[in-house]
């Protein structure tokens, strides 16, 4: 088979061209890194709207499919069996409209509350400083230990000196740079909004022709790989799609519900900074395992500046809310999508979070589920080739591992 490959002149020319291209790219990367980096940056800049479009389409696809199914049920029986058509386009447009409506409602309801909360925090700072100074005066008058008062006064003096030095040596000389950075950040925000707008338009095309793009990708995959390799990769891509779609979309919906519940009950119980702490709780809840703690700590400290009693009440409320979310809301929306132990979820959050920051903490768990499945499949195939499957059976029996695979084979439409 190998000799037949080299006897074909077109195959030899294709191999030589591919090898030459790879050598040229590696050489450019080593000897002209600035040129190579510029090309890569330019390519990413050009493709950024398409990346936004793919992400938006991927997140909205479950909603679009539900809307399309509803439109087809309303229509005739003949239309229910078709794909595409005006129902697909209408579903894509309606899903984009629903996304914008949700974002608009959140901005109109939350943004004014956020501004009010932040303004209240800023306006309360002078009063907090005066209260702290009055407390120091009481310490100095001997109402408590004079030694403790001396330590605190020295600490405050040291902090004041350090702050003054920091303002004079760091802030003021670099004020121009700070203004430039603010301007640059504003320009970057405009760029992000522009890419988001273009991404929304591009996502409509992806939503309308999703199956066609998937079929084209499958053709490319099987054109460059043998059937066994193509089947192996295609099944793993299908598994990864289920992991990411089921977990991330479900987690976003779950966190949105938690944030709304937190806001409603915070208004009912008159917790201060209701909008601000609800946004913090909702956003951090997207992160598995650590999310609830990351949101609760700053929220409780923020309420503590107003009322210690309300801070304790809010802490009790969040504990109850997290129990409801963990035992009722989360399982209903997400279920056991990942199929990996809590240890690997913790490992994935720490590992991918250190690599990619907050996005890594969000996608780390489904990425680890896919890697875990890849390793499991590879180990099982290697054990089967060596006639050691009994070892695998003994392991499952001893450690009671769940043998119900999370994998589902692609349906006939995807396979075809």
Image: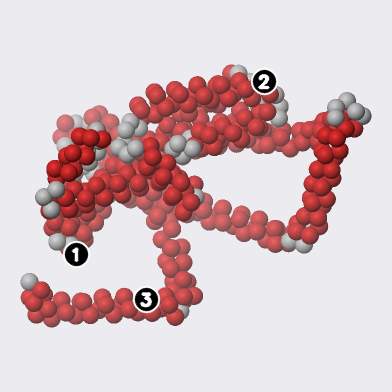
Residue 111 is labelled as none
Residue 309 is labelled as 2
Q: Quadrant of residue 308?
A: top right
Q: Is residue 376 left or right of residue 102?
A: left
* In this rendering, the label closer to the viewer, 1 or 2: 2
> Does 223 appear above or below 414?
below
Q: CA distance from mark 2 to mark 3?
A: 63 Å
* In this rendering, the label closer to the viewer, 1 or 3: 3
Q: Is residue 371 left or right of residue 188?
A: left
Label 2 Cα crowd, 10 Å radius (few <14 / some 14-19 / many 20+): few
Q: Is residue 196 visible?
A: no
Q: Position of residue 379 (x, y in %)?
A: 21, 50
> Does 320 appear above or below 95?
above
Q: Is residue 331 visible?
A: yes
| Discs 1, 2 touching: Cβ within 8 Å | no
Residue 26 is labelled as 3
Q: CA distance from mark 1 to mark 3?
A: 22 Å
Question: How are the residues colored?
Answer: secondary structure
| Discs 2, 3 touching: Cβ within 8 Å | no
Residue 224 is labelled as 1
What residue sits 68% from the left and 37% below the top?
Answer: 118
Tell me which label, 1 or 2, sits earlier in the chain. 1
| Discs 1, 3 touching: Cβ within 8 Å | no
Tell me which label, 2 or 3, sits earlier in the chain. 3
Q: Position of residue 380 (x, y in %)?
A: 18, 48
What residue sits 38% from the left and 37% below the top?
Answer: 342
Q: Position of residue 361 (x, y in %)?
A: 45, 45
Nearer-the-camera pick, 343 or 70 = 343
Tell me which label, 1 or 3, sits earlier in the chain. 3
Q: CA distance from mark 1 to mark 2?
A: 66 Å
Q: Is residue 277 left or right of residue 346?
A: right
What residue sits 84% from the left and 43% below the top?
Answer: 154
């Amino acid at each position: 088979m190998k000799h037949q490959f080299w006897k074909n002149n077109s195959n030899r020319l294709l191999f030589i061209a591919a090898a030459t291209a790879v050598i040229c790219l590696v050489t450019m990367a080593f000897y002209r890194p600035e040129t190579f980096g510029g090309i890569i940056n330019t390519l990413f800049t050009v493709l950024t709207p398409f990346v936004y479009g793919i992400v938006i389409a991927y997140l909205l696809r479950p909603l679009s499919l539900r809307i399309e199914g509803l439109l087809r049920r309303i229509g005739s029986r003949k239309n229910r069996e078709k794909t595409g058509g005006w129902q697909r386009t209408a579903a894509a447009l309606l899903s984009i409209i629903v996304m914008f409506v949700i974002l608009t409602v959140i901005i109109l309801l939350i943004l004014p509350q956020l501004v009010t909360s932040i303004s209240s925090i800023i306006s309360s700072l002078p009063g907090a400083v005066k209260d702290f100074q009055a407390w120091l005066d009481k310490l100095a008058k001997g109402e408590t230990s004079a030694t403790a008062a001396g330590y605190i006064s020295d600490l405050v003096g040291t902090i004041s000196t350090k702050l003054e030095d920091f303002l004079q040596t760091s802030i003021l000389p670099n004020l121009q740079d700070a203004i430039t950075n603010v301007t640059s950040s504003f320009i970057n925000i405009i760029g992000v909004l522009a890419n988001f707008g273009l991404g929304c338009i591009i996502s409509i095309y992806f939503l309308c022709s999703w199956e066609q793009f998937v079929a084209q990708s499958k053709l490319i995959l099987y054109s460059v790989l043998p059937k066994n390799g193509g089947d192996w990769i295609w099944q793993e891509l299908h598994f990864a799609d289920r992991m990411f779609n089921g977990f991330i979309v479900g987690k976003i919906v779950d966190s949105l519900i938690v944030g709304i519940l937190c806001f409603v009950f915070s208004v009912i119980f008159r917790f201060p900074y209701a909008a601000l702490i609800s946004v913090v709780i909702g956003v951090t809840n997207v992160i598995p395992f650590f999310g609830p703690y990351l949101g609760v700590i700053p929220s409780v400290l923020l309420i503590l500046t107003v009322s210690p009693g309300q801070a304790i009440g809010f802490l009790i409320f969040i504990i109850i809310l997290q129990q409801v979310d963990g035992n009722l809301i989360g399982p209903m929306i997400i279920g056991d999508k990942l199929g990996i132990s809590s240890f690997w979820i913790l490992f994935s959050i720490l590992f991918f979070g250190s690599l990619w920051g907050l996005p890594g903490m969000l996608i780390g768990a489904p990425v680890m589920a896919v890697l875990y499945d890849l390793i499991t499949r590879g180990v099982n195939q290697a054990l089967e080739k060596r006639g050691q499957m009994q070892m695998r059976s003994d392991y499952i029996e001893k450690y009671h591992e769940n043998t119900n695979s999370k994998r589902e084979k692609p349906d006939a439409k995807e396979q075809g």
